[in-house]
């Protein structure tokens, strides 16, 4: 089992950058596929990014490609989401998640553990 704690959210202006972190407990962190999701008010939780065990393989939602970069440091049991050129439509609660599956996955139902989320608000 793994416990996930996100941090790094905040209020920024459009065009700014933020880096989210997700600290994981447990000795088997490197065996999990890790993902980032977000949920805006009144909307369903949506996929943002996924990383393989080593972080060498990634997948991104079209809406964030070229602006967001996901990475992980297995030595620190931490996954990151670097968000550049933020837009008001990026405003949401951001969640990290861990999957026991053996491939990059994008659906919420394919992730087994979730953090509590961190709020990101982008003003225009």
Image: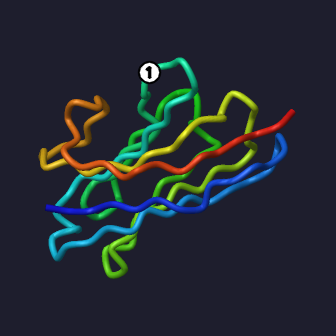
Residue at 13 percent of width and 49 percent of height: 100
Residue displayed at 84% across by 45% down: 13
Q: Is residue 56 above or below residue 74?
A: above
Q: Position of residue 94 (x, y in %)?
A: 51, 44
Which residue is the site of mark 1?
44
Residue 46 percent location from the top left of the image: 43, 28
Q: Quadrant of residue 27?
A: bottom left
Is residue 25 shown left or right of residue 119?
left
Q: How many numbered circles are shown?
A: 1
Q: Secondary structure at mark 1?
A: loop
What residue is shown at x 65% (from left), y 34% (from top)? 90
Residue 7 image point, x, y percent: 53, 62
- Asked if residue 64 is positioned above or below residue 23 in the image, the reply reads above
Image quadrant where one finds the N terminus: bottom left
Viewer-side residue, 45 vs 69 = 45
Q: Is residue 18 left or right of residue 95?
A: right
Q: Is residue 72 above or below residue 44?
A: below
Residue positioned most to the bottom: 75
Q: Is residue 4 left or right of residue 29?
A: right
Q: How is the image coloured?
A: rainbow
Q: Which image quarter holds the C terminus?
A: top right
């Amino acid at each position: 089992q793994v416990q996930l704690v996100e941090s790094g959210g905040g209020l920024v202006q459009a065009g700014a950058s933020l880096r989210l972190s997700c600290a994981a407990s447990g000795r088997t962190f490197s065996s999990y596929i890790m993902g980032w999701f977000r949920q805006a008010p009144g909307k369903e939780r949506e996929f943002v990014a996924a990383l393989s065990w080593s972080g060498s393989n990634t997948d991104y939602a079209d809406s964030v490609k070229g602006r967001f970069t996901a990475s992980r440091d297995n030595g620190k049991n931490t996954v990151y989401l670097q968000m550049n050129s933020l837009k008001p439509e990026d405003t949401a609660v951001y969640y990290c998640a861990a999957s026991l599956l053996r491939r990059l996955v994008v659906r919420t139902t394919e992730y087994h553990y979730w953090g509590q989320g961190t709020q990101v608000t982008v003003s225009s």
